[in-house]
Amino acid sequence: MKRLAIALALSLPAYAATFAHDIAPIVYQNCAPCHRPGEAGPFSLLTYKDVKSHARQIADVTRRRYMPPWAPEAGFGKFADERHLTDAQIRTIAEWVAAGAPEGNPSETPVPPDFKAGWQLGPPDLILEAQATYTLPAAGPDVYWNFIIPAAVTSTRYVRAIEIRPGDKRIVHHANLYIDRARSTRRQEIAEGQGFPGMDVAIDRAIGEPDDGHFLFWKPGGTPYVEPDGFSMRLVPGGDLVLNAHLQPTGKPEQVRPSIGLYFTDKPPDQFPMLVQLEHDGALNIPPGASDYLVSDDFRLPMDVDVLAVYPHAHYLGHVLEGYATLPSGERKWLIRIPAWDPNWQGAYHYKDPVFLPKGTVVSMRYHYDNSPLNPRNPHQPPRRVVSGNQSTDEMGHLWLQVLPRDAAEKGDRRMELQEAVMRHRLQKYPDDFTAHFQLGALRQARLDPVEALAMLRAAVRIQPDHAEARNLLGSALVAMGRNTEALEQFRAAVKARPDYGNARYNLARALARAGKPEEAVENFEIVEKEFPGDATVRDELAELYLRQQKFAEAVEQFDQALALDPTDTAARKSREAALSQAPAKAKTEQAGEIRWVEPHKPLPPFTLQALDGKSWKLADLNGKVVIIDLWATWCVPCRAELPEFQKLYDQWKDRSDVAVISFNVDDDPAVIAPYVAQNHYTFPVLRANELVDAYLSVAFIPQTWFLDADGKLRWIHEGYGGDPKWLETMIAKLAEVLEER
C-alpha cells in the first residue's frame, strides 16, 4: 500500500503556477498601487498582458528583493501594511516565469483593485497649494526642495488626516510634511513664496512647545494615514506647512507645484505622542575606503512608553541600519533592521501593534556606513572623507521614534518631561551644543525653574551671541527673577539681531515701561501694534502706558480698539472708564480719586512677601488688625505725588497695635525701589508684590489704597490720586469707620 502511494505521487504532474490563480493576487497587492496609470511606476501591472511583458524583469527584482520596495528585514519588528514578499512567493514568481508565464483559466483571475481617483480620503475640508511652481532642471543630481505653504485658517483648527498630492509622481520620489507655527522656515527662502533647497529641515518651535509627534510622510503607492481618535494635530492662523520633496530629473524641465488636503475634526487632541530622535552626527567622520563605519547612540527612557512608529534616516553611505531596545530585564526587543539601506526608499513605518517599553529601557541605534568604491550609491568616486551635513552628499544618522507616554491619563501631557531627557542626553554628547542649552533653558523656564533656565540660556548666548531667540528667552528668564535692567539689555540685543522679531520687541517695550522709559516704550509698542493689528493685549498694554503718562485721549482710543477686538475684555472696559473719569475737560489734573465699596467682601489670597528691610510679612500675621495697603511703583507719576501723604498716614498710625499700614510695590525691577525710598526718606514698610498682584488681583491702574477689615477681607478701595488736599483726612475717616465695625 505504501509503495502504491509513492508510485501515484511520482506519476502525478507537478503543479504549475498560473497568473490567474497565483501571480495576480501577489501583483495586485504588492505592485499595482504604484504600477498603474497616473502613479510613479514606469509601467502598469493591472492585466495579464502587462505582467507577462515584464515577467523576467519582475522575477529578477523580486529575487534581489529590490521590488517591492520594502526595506525592513522580516522578523525585526511587525509593521502595518507590510509589502514584504515571502520566500515562497518569490519562488512562485520564479517558477511561473520559468514555465513560460502561463495565464491559466481567465475566469479565476481576481478583479483588479479599484483604486479611487482623485483624493483618496474623499473631498478635503481645505485644499492648500504651494505659492509658486518650482522648475526642476532636465538633468543633474536629485533635488530636495522645500515648499512653504501658508496655513489658510482664520482660527485654530484640529486636523485628523492630511493627504499630500506632490505633483507628477514620476518626478517626486517621496516627501515629508512639517507644521511650522512660528513661520521660522521663511527666513531660509531664496525669495518670498519661492521655497528653499535642502535635504533636511529644522523647524523652530514656540518656547516650551514640543514637536507635534506625527510622521507626515508621502511615498508612491502609500495611502494617507488617518490619525486615531484623540491624536489630532493643531493648525493655527499665520502658521505654515513645509513640504520637503525629493525630486528626480526626467531628461526635460519639469514643473512641480504640490497641493495638500486637510481633513478637520472638532475634537482637540487628548493623546500627546512625541518624536524622539536618536542620533550621533557629531561622530560622523567617515574616511575614504571605510566599508563598515559604525555610529551609535543609546537613550534611556525616563518613563513607560508605547512606540507607535519608526523612521530611520541616513544618506547615500548608509548600509545596515539597526534600532533596538534593551529592557530593564536585559531582554532585547528589535524595533527595526534594514540590511541594505537605500535612501531612495526611505519611509516611516507604523507598527502593527504598539511596542511597549518600560521606564529604564535603553533604546539603541547602530548604523553602519560604507564609504568604499564598491558602494554603488557612493556619491564620490573615488571616495573622499564624509562628515555630517544637510546636503545629500554629506551624511546623517537619525532614528526617529513616535512614542506615547503610558500614564498620560493620570499625568497629562508629558512631552516636555520627555523632551528634557532627550536634551540632557544631547548635552552629554555635545557639551557645547547650542540647541541643547537653548531647549533646556526654555524647558526649565516653562517648568518654573528660573535658576537653571538662566544658566542654560547664558550658555546658549555664549555659544551663539547673535541668536535672537536665545537673547529674547534669556531676557524673559531675567524678568522672571526680577532683574529688569539686565533683561532690557538682552531684549535690545534680540531686536538688534532681528529687527522684525515681534515677540522680542514686545518684551522690549514692556521692559522699557518697567524701567521708567515711557517714550521709548510707546515707540516700540507702536511698532508691535502694526505687526500684530489683531492682538487686543498689545493695545491694552499700550493704552495702560498712555494712562500712566496721563495721555487720556490716546488711552481711550487704544482701549476702544482693544474692546473692538475682544468685547469680553472686562479689564480693558474698566480701565477705559477710569481713563475717561480721570480726564474731565482736560484741565483737572488734580483729581480727588474715587472710593468704592467692594461687594461682596473679598478676601486677599494668603501671601508671604519680603520687605526691603528683609522682614517677611504674612497675611495670617495681620489677622485681627485693620490693614491699609498702598499700591505704587516708581514709574507712576500719581504714585510719586501720593506717597508723601501716605508717609504722613503711616506716621500717625504706625504705633497702633490694632492697625497695620504697609505698601505693595509693583515695580518689575527691584533694583530701582530701595534707592527711590531712601532718596525720599520713606519709612513705611515696602513689600515686593508685583507677582502677587499680577497673578491674583485685578488692578486696572495705580495708585490704589486698600482697606482690609480685621478678618482680612477687602472692604474699601481708593483709586487714583490728583493732589486732593483732603486725601489724608479721607483716609483717616475710612480707617476709623472700619475700626468701628470690629
Image: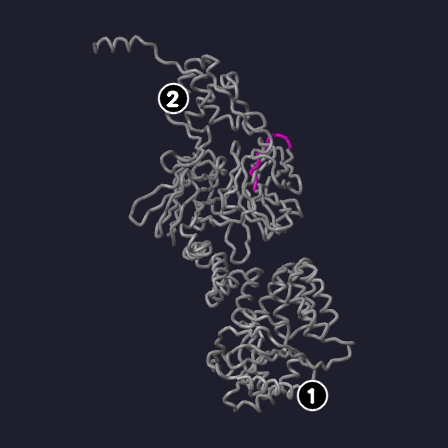
Percent across and percent down for residue 519 are 69, 72
What type of secondary structure mainly makes up the magenta span? loop
Q: Quadrant of residue 3?
A: top left
At label 1, counting other C-alpha atoms closer than 10 Å, the crowd grade (few under 14, some 14-19, many 20 or more) is few
Q: Nearer the viewer, mark 1 or mark 2?
A: 1
Q: Is residue 370 left or right of residue 665?
A: left
**Circle 1/circle 2 CB separation < 8 Å:** no
Percent across and percent down for residue 433 are 47, 57
Q: Is residue 591 above or below residue 402?
A: below
The amino acid beneath tag 2 is Arg
Q: Is residue 180 above or below residue 700?
A: above
Q: CA distance from mark 1 to mark 2?
A: 105 Å
The magenta stretch is: 244-253
Helix, strand or loop status at disc 2: helix
Q: Label for residue 91?
A: 2
Name the residue carrying label 1: 725
The amino acid beneath tag 1 is Pro
Assess whether residue 250 is covered by the magenta stretch. yes
